[in-house]
């Protein structure tokens, strides 16, 4: 790693790493200090990264896993052995510095959806990251009566971040009571046998999800959907929504569902 320039406190947009947690050999999460003037909306992403050997920033888009009110900024990442950024980012330690640009943006925000009674958060892999933020925002529980967090991974050990996150949300002093009453976590695996097996798209389009929970199938008259995963999952889930009559929303034009790619690099 010595061929790479090191980010220091003096590097523009540097933030200090506060903690790092490795979940599997492919997944880790970390928290950085929140710059005093940094504001964002729950569900948004920012550009973060390190420096190349020429001292140039090497940045990727990362969803912020913290809710807007938190005093730290969290991220959840895959480790790609030959990924230009994550092959190095996975080695960061407490008190290291990384670059975090101060311009949050994104479509997975509550403001891009019109009012309804149920909110379905549909994710695969690290696509759960923005929903880690959304499920800890009190406004989510004010705007929606019921929140369903779908998270599919290939193997059961990859679900541990989400399981721990939901447990944390349900015991939180600020939103714990609401999360306990209104949030349903639906972790599933696709290549392991577990309590719930299958891709979220299949569980929704087959109706299995609704039968299991004994709730009505999704409909634009009662529900809103946020989608975050691989490009193919996003396309498939978007098609399911559109076929059911949902209209895609945006910050400038709130509607029934929003989509964002889980960024990898
Ligand atoms: P599968 O095992 O059937 O491919 P990955 O690790 O490749 O990013 O995948 C994360 C999860 O996303 C896996 O459970 C995978 O299921 C699932 N997945 C991949 N493509 C799609 C898709 N088009 N629709 C729904 N789920 C998908």
Image (cartoon, rainbow, N blue to C red):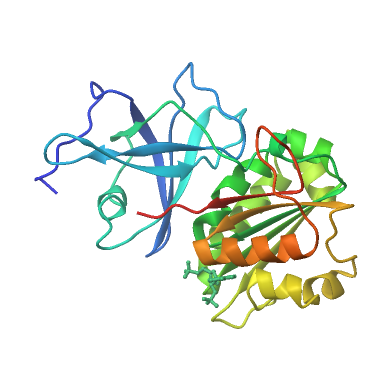
Residue at 15 percent across and 34 percent down: it is 55
Q: Position of residue 126 (x, y in %)?
A: 50, 57
| Quarter of the image where the C terminus is located | bottom left
Q: Provide residue 247's location: percent of width, then percent of height.
A: 75, 51
Residue located farthest toward the top when viewing the structure as drawn? 37
Q: Name the residue located 84 percent from the left edge and 40 percent from the top edge.
A: 115
Image quarter for residue 99? Answer: top left
The foreground one among 65 and 242 is 242
State whether residue 173 appears in this view.
Answer: no
**Left or right of 196 in this view: 8:** left
Q: Is residue 80 left or right of residue 192?
A: left
Q: How many marks?
A: 0
Q: Residue at x 10, y 45 (%)?
A: 2
- Quadrant of residue 243 within the rendered picture: bottom right
Q: Which quarter of the picture shows residue 97?
A: top left
Residue 127 drawn above or below residue 3: below
From this view, report whether residue 41 is shown above or below residue 238: above
Can residue 28 be seen at all in this image of the molecule?
yes
Front in this rendered view, residue 15 or 104: 104
Outermost left residue: 3
96 horizontally vs 112: left or right: left
Measured from the top left, where is residue 200 in percent x and y?
A: 66, 69
Q: Residue at x 58, y 30 (%)?
A: 70
- Residue 257 location (% of width, % of height): 71, 50
Relative to the observer, which residue lies in front, 44 or 241? Answer: 241
- Compare residues 157 and 79 and report the one nearer the observer: 79
């Amino acid at each position: 790693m010595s061929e790479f320039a090191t980010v220091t406190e003096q590097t523009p947009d540097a933030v200090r790493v506060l903690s790092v947690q490795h979940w599997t050999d492919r997944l880790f999460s970390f928290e950085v200090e929140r710059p005093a003037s940094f504001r964002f909306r729950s569900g948004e992403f920012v550009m973060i990264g390190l420096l190349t050997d020429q001292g140039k920033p090497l940045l990727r888009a990362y969803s912020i896993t913290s809710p807007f009110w938190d005093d730290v900024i969290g991220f959840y990442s895959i480790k790609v052995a030959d990924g230009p950024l994550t092959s190095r980012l996975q080695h960061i330690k407490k008190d290291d510095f990384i670059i975090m640009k101060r311009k949050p943006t994104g479509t997975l925000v509550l403001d891009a959806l019109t009012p309804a009674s149920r909110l379905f958060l549909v994710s695969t892999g690290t696509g759960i990251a923005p929903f880690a933020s959304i499920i800890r925002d009190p406004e989510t529980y004010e705007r929606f009566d019921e929140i369903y967090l779908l998270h599919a991974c290939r193997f059961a050990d990859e679900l541990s971040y989400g399981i721990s996150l939901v447990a944390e949300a349900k015991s939180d002093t600020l939103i714990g009571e609401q999360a306990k009453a209104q949030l349903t976590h639906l972790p599933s695996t696709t290549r392991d046998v577990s309590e719930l097996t299958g891709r979220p798209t299949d569980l929704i389009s087959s109706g299995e999800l609704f039968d299991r929970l004994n709730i009505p199938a999704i409909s634009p008259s009662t529900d809103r959907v946020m989608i975050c995963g691989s490009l193919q999952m996003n396309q498939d889930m978007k098609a399911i929504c559109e076929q059911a009559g949902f209209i895609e929303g945006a910050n400038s034009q709130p509607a029934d569902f929003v989509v964002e790619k889980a960024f990898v690099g």
